[in-house]
Amino acid sequence: MAASSSSFVFAAALLVLAAATAAQAQRETKLRVFWHDVVSGGPNSTVAQVAEAPTTNASATGFGAVVVIDDPLTDGPNLTASRLVGRAQGMYVAAGKDALSLMMAMNFVFAGDGPYNGSSLAILGANPAERAVREMPVVGGTGVFRFARGYCQATTWWFNATTGDATVEYNIHLRLD
């Protein structure tokens, strides 16, 4: 009985030590980027609506519209004066019938001479656009963000209701192995 009891205590101690080591191995990273949705750019537009429901045009929220993006990501809110750090590539779907809510599926693909060059983050979730601050999950990443998980908070910095152009600040909170 004493041998099995001491084996149990030893196994429990190893389990606690492994959990503590795994927790210490994680590191947290915070990033801030500005996402520029350029609808009015003509041939330089970064947005393309690729599908819509029969009722999309009659809907106050654009319900059913599917939009593909290749939006610039910068380190500041001014698209032309800020440094380009990457692209937001993916799509969003107008998924809210009664309130403007977008289902976002996009990768933040980092480029340039920074430490994240060639790495990406995957963001997938609901974006209730009428809220001041929206939270979406970060579900993974590549390169230096491999095994990333966390969340991002999106805040509209600027929106032109006539053209649909927008600048959104993304504050990204990550845990990395």
Image: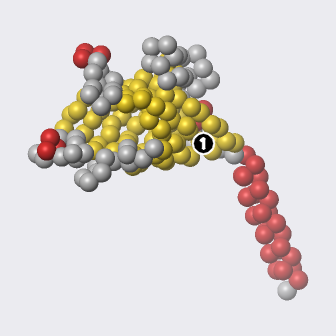
- Report helix, strand or loop for mark 1: strand
Residue appearing at x 60%, y 20% in the figure? 114
Quick check: 7 above or below 135?
below
Left or right of residue 88, residue 85 in this image: right
Q: Nearer the viewer, residue 126 or 14?
A: 126
113 left or right, relative to 139: right
The residue most toward the front is 161
Q: Which residue is mark 1?
A: 174
Residue name at image x 62 percent, y 23 percent: 115
Viewport quadrant of the C terminus: top right
142 relative to 151, above or below: above
**Res 12 → quadrant:** bottom right
Which of these two is toward me, 75 or 7?
A: 75
Residue 159 x, y percent position in the rendering: 37, 30
In this rendering, position of residue 84 left or right of residue 115: left
Task: Specify the quadrant that holds the N terminus.
Answer: bottom right
Is residue 43 shown to the viewer in this render? Answer: yes
Residue at screen point 21% across, 34% down: 50
What amino acid does circle 1 point to?
Leu
